[in-house]
Structures are given as C-alpha cells and as structure tokens.
Image (cartoon, rainbow, N blue to C red):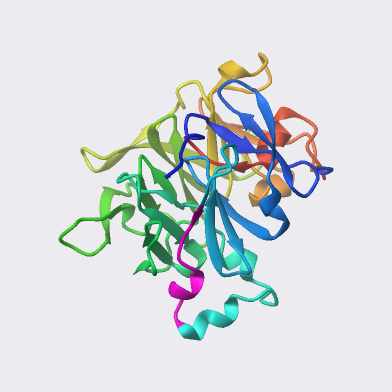
Amino acid sequence: MDRRFHPWRWTMLKEQLTTPDRRCFLNTSTGECVKVHIPELHDHRLLALTPEGLLVLVHDCKYIRLLNPLTRHLTHLPPLTKLLPPEDHHKLSEDYICFDVEFRAWGSGIANDDSTVLLCFNKLCIIGMAKPGDDSWNLLTYPDGTTMAALMFQGRFCCVNRSGVMVLEMGAHQPPHLKLAAKLSMRVSPIADSVHLINKCGELMLVHRRCGRLTARNKSGRRYDAYRVDFDSGTLFPVKTLGGTAVFMGLYCSLSVPLGGFPSGSLSADTIYLRFDIRERMMLKAGAYHLADTSVQLPSSLVPRPHTLIDCLSFSKTVSE
C-alpha cells in the first residue's frame, strides 16, 4: 500500500476558480501549499480523504479506487456491487439523486495491519473491509444512531452510539465487531445534539455539541463541551484546553491545526471553529467557540468563497493525521 503522503497533516482547499483536475493541498503543520494535477477527477467522484492522505474515488458509481495524489499510485478495490445487497443496486446509478449523500465515505482509511482498507458509509450504516486483490468486501452493519463523524484513529475505526465511543475489532478468530471503548458520561439528545470525534495530534477527543443558555458572551444558544477519550480507563475526561491547537469542526469531519505554521493572530488557540455545514455557522450566530471562557465569536460573514485563513479551513475537505 502506497502511503508516502502520510507524513503530511493536510487539507484539500476549496477553490472557486480551480480547474477540474487540479487541487490545492495545505500542510497544516507548516502552512505550505502544493498544487497537484489529478486527471482522475475528470471521470471519478471524490468520496472522501483518508488519514493516510489517500483519495477515495469512485468510477461509474461502482468501482472504488484509492489514489495517492503525489505518487500517482492507484489501488483498485472490489466494486460497490459486492458490498450492497442486490435490492440496493439501483442506488449505484448516475440518476440516483442521493448518491453523493448516502455514499459519503468519511471514516474510511487503512487498518493498522497496513493492508486492509476500511470503507465506511455512515448514512447506510455499513463498513466494508477488503485488501487489494480481494474479489469482495467483508461486510459489517451497525445500528442507526451512530455519529456522522466517524474516523480512523491510529489504524482503528471509531464511532459513537448511544452507549459511547465504539472501536472496530478485527481479530483472526472472530468476525469484525464494534466494541465499547469509552462510556458516554453525559446525556446526548438524538434530536438537538451531535457528537464529534477529533484526532488532536495523536489524541482522540470527543466534542458534545449541545443546547446551552443564551448569555451576553454566547448568543447562539449552543455549547461545545470537549472531552479526552481515555482508552485505558474506558472513560471521558472533560477538558478546557486543546493543547494550544485550534479545531475546525464539521458534521462529517474535523481537523486539528497547530498554530506554529501560520501568522501570529490568524488563529486562536484552544478554540473550536465551526465549518460551514454546522447550522449555527450558517445562521450567522456562531463562528468560533473559545473553550477557556465559553464565549462565542460571531462569524465575519457568510461568504460564497474563502477570503481568510479561517474561511479556507472552514470550507476545506479535511483529514487528521
């Protein structure tokens, strides 16, 4: 498996005037930008970016490939027809209007055996597991109600359900299954709240987005409580700091950003910035949440294209290291 893009902590920027087959990647550790020619984007759809820096692509709504955008190495995987039951094959069509929604693949990546690819479709509540050269996917279905922000953390698939943080176990002598790794220590409303997993520089964090009280410092009515996931004790520990980093949090994926590679004052430490798919950001009520004093910073505007560094990172397609 070609993973030479892995040392980067990077995000693919949204550019309004970009050519169809070129993308700009921002190294969030150094602030360096690289433009990459990706001719596969002419006839493939981009489903997700993996923590290893690989692009999850689909051709003709069926054929899954992993592309390393720097080395041009392309890995072929079993088609989606080997993952979905026959009664769902009608979804694998250009005419199926919900394809781009149901087949978002955030949470996909390479398992810690360095050869198994995990393909996650959270809307469909399925995980497919396969190695290059396999003819079919090993399928795991899981109950609805799991957080949309599933992710790969240190080669392990993680998500959240009503019980807590779940981790995918893949043993040689038992079928793949989700195992409870840390219990939830708070009540989560399935209607009003959301839960987000974030890889903060090698440490797994959980953010509980919930309703709060309207105050002079917080007119959005939202709180964002942060917790550190402790796998040894199986518990969540509340924190008031992100270790000096900033987090850009979206419904489907989030990104932690160290401040050292960017101009002083362009980002605030220990701050959760809301991406443009978060409702309160769209309603111009909350742009950033400062953990230390629980204050909310209003967004400057709802812009149709990025203008500032914060806008660029809020619009970007993100992965964590």
Residue 130's x, y, as percent?
Answer: 37, 60
Q: Which residues are magenta?
A: 75-85
Residue 282's x, y, as percent?
Answer: 72, 49
Residue 165 in the magenta stretch? The answer is no
Residue 7's x, y, as percent?
Answer: 48, 29
Quarter of the image where one finds residue 297: top right
Would you say 305 lies left or right of 4 here?
right
Would you say 33 lies left or right of 183 here?
right
Quarter of the image where one finds residue 266: top right
Residue 57's x, y, as percent?
Answer: 58, 56
Quarter of the image where one finds residue 169: bottom left
Residue 83 in the magenta stretch? The answer is yes
Q: Nearer the viewer, residue 204 or 175?
A: 175
Q: Nearer the viewer, residue 243 or 315?
A: 315
Would you say 18 lies left or right of 187 here?
right
Residue drawn at x 71%, y 35% as measured from the top left? 312
In the rendered image, which quarter contains the N terminus? top left
Whether residue 286 is visible: no
Q: Nearer the viewer, residue 297 or 4?
A: 4
105 over 1 or under it: above or below: below
Whether residue 249 is visible: yes
Q: Residue furthest bottom?
A: 87
Residue drawn at x 27%, y 61% as measured from the top left? 177
Task: State how many labels appear.
Answer: 0
Q: Residue furthest top?
A: 264
118 over 22 or under it: above or below: below
